[in-house]
Each structure stands twice: as C-alpha cells, then as structure tokens.
Image (cartoon, helix red, strand yellow):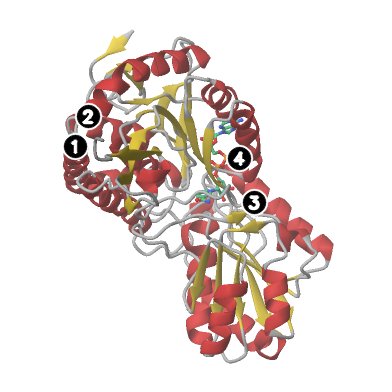
Amino acid sequence: MSISSPTPSTEQGQIYRNFIGGEWRNSQSGETFVSTNPAHTSEVIGRYQKSTAADIEDAIDVAVKAQPGWAATPAPERGEILLRAALLLDEEKEELATLMTREMGKLLKETRGDVQTAIDVAKYVAGEGRRAEGETVPSALPNKFCMTMRQPIGIVGIITPWNFPLAIPAWKTFPALLAGNAVVLKPASDTPLLVLKLADILQRAGLPTGVLNVVTGPGGTLGDALVSNKRVNMISLTGSTEVGRRVAEICGRDLRRCALELGGKNAVIVLEDADLDLAVASVTLGAFGTTGQRCTATSRVIVQKSVQKVFTDRLVAAAEKLRVGDGLDPDVDMGPLVNTGRVKAVQEYAEIGKQEGAKLVLGGSPLTGGDYREGAYYEPTIFTDVAPSMRIAREEVFGPLLSIVPIDSYEEAIKVANSTEYGLSTAIFTESSRLSFRAMRDIESGLVYINAPTTGAEIHMPFGGMKASGNGHRELGKKAVEDFSETKTIFVSYPARK
Ligand code: NAD
C-alpha cells in the first residue's frame, strides 16, 4: 500500500512508513517496530516499518530508474535543492531538535547543534554544485590537453548510527546527491524518525521522485540486503568497527566501494605543563557530553603522574556537579543513554574495570528510582590507576565511563595513546609548542586537537579515522563530494594536420 502523506496515521504519532519512490509505503512484511524515549521508556516515539529484503529491492528498483535523470540535471540545480532543504531545516530546527531529544535522549542544546550541522552541510555542499571542479594540468606531450571530471557512482547505500540522528545522514546524503547519485538510506532502529523527516524536507525542497529512498528495519537482515545487492555501487556506513568489517568483506568480494566511519577509543593527553583548568573543562565535555556516546568522545585520559592527583581531584569535582536527567530540561547537563541495553553494556564495563583492579573514583552504577525510574540513566563514571592493557583502556565503551591512565613522560603518553586498535580523535594539553608539533606528527589518529576537547569537528574540515576507526575515507570538507564520485581522466590531442 502506498500513502501520500508522511504524517503519522494516529494522533499519538505512531505509525511511520518507508519513503520509496516519493511515496510513504508500508513494508511488505506487514510488521512494525517501536522506538521509545530513553528518558521515559514508556513513551512511544513512533512505530516504524520492520522492512525486509523485498522492500530494499523495491527501493533499489526505484533508485535505478531515477538516477540517470538526476545525473543529467545540472549540478548547480542539484545544489539549489540542497539550499532549499537548508532553509526548511532552519525553519523547522526547533521542532526537529525537540523530536531528536525525545527520540535518543541528548540535550536540547546538543540536538540543536545536530540540526545546525545538517543546515551547514546543506549550504556548504550546495555551493559545490557550482564548483564540482576537476583538474586541468599541462600535458607531458606537445599539442595535448589533460583534465579530470567527476561523474556519479550510481546507486549509493547509506547506513547510519543513532548518535547523530540527522547530522550524519545529512553529511552523507547531501554530497552523495550533489554528485548525481541516487540513494537508499537505512537509518539506525533507535532513530528512524529524523531521517524520515529529512526525506520529507528534501521532497518539499524539490528533490525528484526516487532519488532518495528510506527503508527502516533491523540492521542485520536489512543492512545485509542493502550491502550485498550488486546494483548498489557504493556503501557509506557509520557504525561500529564490527559491522564495518562485515560490510567491507561483502563489498570487497565484488570490488564495490565502501566508505566506513567506525569506532574510537579517544584519548586526551595531559602533560605536567598543561593549563589544568582548560584540560578539566575539555575532558568533562568530551567524556560526558552526549552521555559519552559520540564516536569522538573522550574515553581515556593519559596524564603525567606529577599532576595526576590534582587533575583527577578537579575532574571528579567537575563531573560530580553534572546534573543527569531528561535532555528537554534546560537545567540538565547529561541526558540518558540511548536505550536500557546500553545501560547494561556500560555497567558490564564498570564491573570489568573493578575486576581488572582499576580504582573507581566516581559513579559506576545505573541511576534508578525517583525521576530516573523509567529512563536509561547512568552515573558519570571515572576510573583511575588504569593500566593500558586493561579492557577499559582498550575497548570502546560508548557511554559516560572514563579511564585515567598515569604515565611518566611525553614519549610514554604517545605510546599509550597509540596502543589501541582505533585512531579517530586524540587531544593533547600542553603549553609547549615543541611538544604540540611533535604530537601532531606522532599521534596516530585522523583528528588531532591541541588544547581542545576530542569532540569539536567542523563541517568544512575532513573528518574520519585511521587504523580500525575507518578505511581511509574522509567525510565532510571539500573532498566529500569527490568521495561519492568517479574521477575520469581525459586526454585531448590536437596536433596540426600534416
Ligand atoms: P552499529 O554498528 O550497531 O550500527 C550502525 C548501523 O549499521 C545501524 O543502522 C545498524 O542498523 C546497521 N547495521 C547493523 N548490522 C549491520 C549489518 N550486518 N550490515 C549492515 N548494517 C548493519 O553502531 P551503532 O550502535 O548504531 O553506533 C555506534 C557506533 O558507531 C560506535 O562504534 C561509534 O563509535 C560509531 N560511530 C562512528 C562515527 C565516526 O564517524 N567514526 C560516528 C558515529 C558513530
């Protein structure tokens, strides 16, 4: 059945449909799944289509038909649609941010930032429609001209996580569309609503039918169906390293392109000459902002022993003051985790930390009872005297749990910072320009911050990780459109006629 309205069919905002071929369609499965507010788990945010491989197939059929017409549309016109989407996102920013807080729990100021990122990316990428430049370079031969041009890849499958429900889908979808591709997008099951809203906005902005399609449902079956489909020319996934490996294996078999943004175990190095107030404020934000659920969240502090105690005391004092609660409450500093399963996962890591012999100096338990009785709440948690070999120093927790690792020297700090499989974001706090420059060179991560938190990406700068945090691609910045394009190299010869 196809329905022309994106609006939910009941007053409670309950049933949302897939967006395929410009229509709102039920899944062929006839089944739905529910997403709830993590601050009040009895509050249902929406009921979404539990789609199957057959729905993915339908979406790909439609995308394949729509893509050539879209590719033939001049790139500046494609950009104009994104610009109109930016204006609509801006008009609806407050409503989208509030929905997002209810859907996944982060603070209203954080969800406003998430929507603003989507707006900024739309404006930035729209401008690329009038650039989308290639290179023209001198030929090594006489009477010859060399240039490159970009062409669409074709059909792009996009798979997104729940922690940036709008920003990440937007920063993948906009450059993919600008490059002339058609898209099939599968959002995370905790946060399908904001992606369906994005589809609605792009349709209202004038995106032609079938160029963007959204199918909701379980990651395993649906993700596999999208990734395995040979008509999908490229997969762009942000998610865990485990899922990334699987996706890379499947795409690798057919030599199809996949761009992966994966997990992290991000470290802040605090040297003895650091501005400790700045370091404490930055670590508090990096570790407990978005309840520790950013891929760039600070998960380790590697601190020189001479300042370990004073730094830890100040950090614990700052973290103790954080008010945990519903992200819609303006007095709250840290919202819930995305669901109760994540509370269990963080609790398991707290137990592992204790068993491994690390010293718990703050938190370490779920928050229950009273205002917390029906939410996915967890205390800001800090372990100190953590050894680099411990699991809480090596594995991604993805929650408000921080491990402090004491070290003796700059050299040891770098060795520990680089000792995990990940390489997404690392910060160093020092007043020494000599050590700052050495750190820029020595740190093995895609993002390096000097005297700033691990979490401050900017949309006009490349974003992505080294090692197991990705597969070498970068998102955002001026290369974003290129990543969703084929580069064609052209040689034109114009010798004189003999
Ligand atoms: P996840 O890997 O569980 O899921 C990510 C997406 O993949 C979801 O849409 C999910 O449904 C889908 N999926 C699950 N199994 C799949 C499969 N077999 N095939 C295809 N798709 C599948 O991750 P998550 O819990 O949604 O997000 C948290 C993770 O994402 C963390 O590891 C975090 O570090 C990472 N992340 C990375 C970045 C980055 O830019 N590097 C940004 C945000 C989040």
Q: Measuring 34% from the left and 34% from the top, which residue is drawn there?
A: 151
In the picture shown, does residue 400 fall above or below 87? Answer: below
In the picture shown, does residue 423 fall above or below 219? Answer: below
**Dot 4 surroundings within 10 Å: few (below 14), some, or many (20 or more)?**
many
Q: Amino acid at mark 3?
A: Ala
Q: Position of residue 449 (x, y in %)?
A: 49, 72
> Quarter holding the C terminus?
top left
The foreground one among 364 and 231 is: 231
> Gap in Å between the C-alphas at discs 1 and 2?
6 Å
Q: Amino acid at mark 2?
A: Leu
Q: Decide: marks 1, 2 in contact (CB < 8 A)? A: yes
In the rendered structure, which disc, 4 or 3, sits on the residue that comes first in sequence?
4
> Gap in Å between the C-alphas at discs 4 and 1?
31 Å
Q: Measuring 21% from the left and 45% from the top, which residue is drawn there?
A: 86
In the rendered structure, which disc, 1 or 3, sits on the residue that comes first in sequence?
1
CB of mark 4 near ligand 1 (< 8 Å): yes
In the rendered structure, which disc, 4 or 1, sits on the residue that comes first in sequence?
1
Q: Amino acid at mark 1?
A: Ile
> Gap in Å between the C-alphas at discs 1 and 3?
35 Å
The circle on residue 81 is: 1
> Gap in Å between the C-alphas at discs 2 and 4?
30 Å
**Dot 1 surroundings within 10 Å: few (below 14), some, or many (20 or more)?**
many
In the picture shown, does residue 264 fall above or below 319? Answer: above
Considering the numbered disc 1 on the image, is that residue within a helix, a strand or a loop?
helix
Residue matched to label 3: 468
Considering the numbered disc 3 on the image, is that residue within a helix, a strand or a loop?
loop
Q: Amino acid at mark 4?
A: Gly
Residue matched to label 4: 244
Q: In the image, 24: left or right of 105?
A: left
The foreground one among 231 and 419 is: 231
In the rendered structure, which disc, 1 or 2, sits on the residue that comes first in sequence?
1
